[in-house]
Image: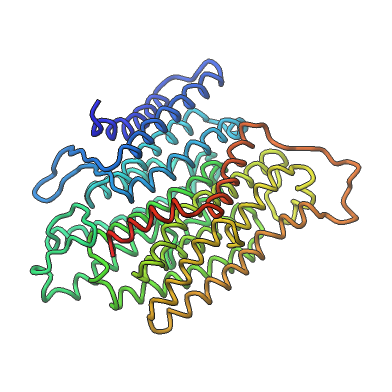
Amino acid sequence: MSHSVIILLAIFVPILWGLGLLVKPEFKNRKTLVAVAGAGLVATAVLSMAVIVSGKMELMLFSLGENMNIFFRVDNVGRMFALIVTIVWVLAGFYAFEYMKHEKEEKRYFGFYMMVFGVLLALTFAGSMVTYYLFYEMMTLLSVPLVLHSKTREAIMGGLKYLFYSLFGAYMVLFGIYFLNKYASTLDFQAGGALDMSAVAGNEGLLLIVAFSMILGFGVKAGMFPLHAWLPTAHPVAPAPASAVMSGIIVKMGVLGMLRVVYFMFGADFLQGTWVQKAWMVLALITVFMGSMLAYREKVLKKRLAYSTVSQISYILFGMALLQPEALTGSLLHVVFHAVIKSTLFMCAGAIIYKTGKTNVLEVKGIGKEMPVTIWCYTFASLALIGIPPASGFISKWYLAIGSLDSEIHVFSWLGPVVLLISALLTAGYLLPITIKGFLPGADYDYDSLKKKEPVKMMVIPLVVLAALAILLGVFPNPLTDFISEIVNSVL
């Protein structure tokens, strides 16, 4: 079997597998459903890893016209994103086999979950802007059912808000593609940029507007101010495993879209020093601070974590906007670390809800006594997100701060690290009280009625694996850092 065919299988096997789950009549027993869905996850993971380890390859599907190729190309950026998608998606999937017991319509959930898996891999391996856009829209449409799964009024409204915001952002990207088709030498991704500078000459102002439109468009999915409001509405109403992958993975497709637009279509040199770069940095820093403040004030646990995602994703966007090597390295490191950390936190929140029904941070007093493994996983992930060395978040934030200081961009070179530091303190303020009150409930806690409520291994093992990764990626960062440095050197 040729390597190029493996790409096709990695993408379309989960899509067809999920479609099969949706159209098949109800299973006679739940174990069969879990076995079929589990087999699909494992098969897709094996195919995805085969593509990742095979290295660079390409597969042309068809063309929609001149300069509009639909094809897949595996590069280092795609391999990195595909790896984190595969790890988190499979672990959250196995976690969901237990969690979804108390939810209805499990077959529908796992059907759409499998289809989105395939679409995400298509996005990571997309070779052109047109290919990326087609699967980006597909990702939105197929992930909406994960948000409104429970079909409560809040879930339906959250799903619709997610859909409308996402479609608006996608149309802003489509607007940009129309102009790129005229002013770029190709719509295929090219490291360093694909603009035809002879065609651009005299139209630089228009192309800057186009670039900003596309950054805002992908910024919707990434939760960047001012189009972030869907995220704290949609994530909390989804089932916990869906919240985990939406916060850890799906929002990263907005980040990947920005990365492709800025560094593979326009090129960093074209945007360096322009109003687009400054406006992007302003929006990112506003989002970092605003998200942290809103998370600090929020009392509903999953909503607090959703606001945290709004803040943390803009760490990544700020690093990208600096157009500086160390900052971009920190940005891509944080893509990986945040995916692992935030998936862990949402799944810990889901375990608490599943075993106790408690959703408010004021209700979890003593939870560490009842669910020690879960809360230790939560604690390690929290320390990593805050950036306490040697946990992973410290490494990415160090690179972001160094990159900002070295950028020598007026005001932003020092304002960036200041905002990141304030946000880190707020992150500690909204995450650690749960650990402190969980393990140290005080003298008035009823120790006599204490009962262990740890979830089953199917839920605990993914938590332990992800929490361990959140720490180990910081203790042993060099392999990942070296790999990302190769990416940065190719685009800057």
Q: Nearer the viewer, residue 162 or 264?
A: 264
Residue positioned most to the top: 28
Q: Residue at x 23, y 62 (%)?
A: 192
Residue 134 in percent (x, y) is at: 26, 46
User: Looking at the image, is 32 positioned above or below residue 330?
Assistant: above
Residue 463 in percent (x, y) is at: 61, 41
Which quadrant is home to the C terminus? bottom left
Which quadrant is home to the N terminus? top left
Q: Quadrant of residue 308?
A: bottom right
Q: Quadrant of residue 85?
A: top left
Residue 357 in percent (x, y) is at: 70, 42
Residue 269 shows in the view? yes
Q: Nearer the viewer, residue 272 or 63?
A: 272
The total of numbered circles placed on residues is 0
User: Looking at the image, is 353 positioned above or below residue 325?
Assistant: above
Q: Is residue 276 left or right of residue 357?
A: left
What colour-coding does the image apply? rainbow
Residue 171 in percent (x, y) is at: 28, 57
User: Looking at the image, is 387 positioned above or below residue 269?
Assistant: above
Residue 161 shows in the view? no
User: Looking at the image, is 348 positioned above or below residue 329?
Assistant: above
Q: Is residue 74 left or right of residue 22?
A: left
Q: Residue at x 44, y 62 (%)?
A: 330
Residue positioned most to the bottom: 410
Q: Residue at x 29, y 78 (%)?
A: 273
Q: Residue at x 38, y 48 (%)?
A: 80
Q: Nearer the viewer, residue 492 or 154?
A: 492
Q: Is residue 247 left or right of residue 103?
A: left
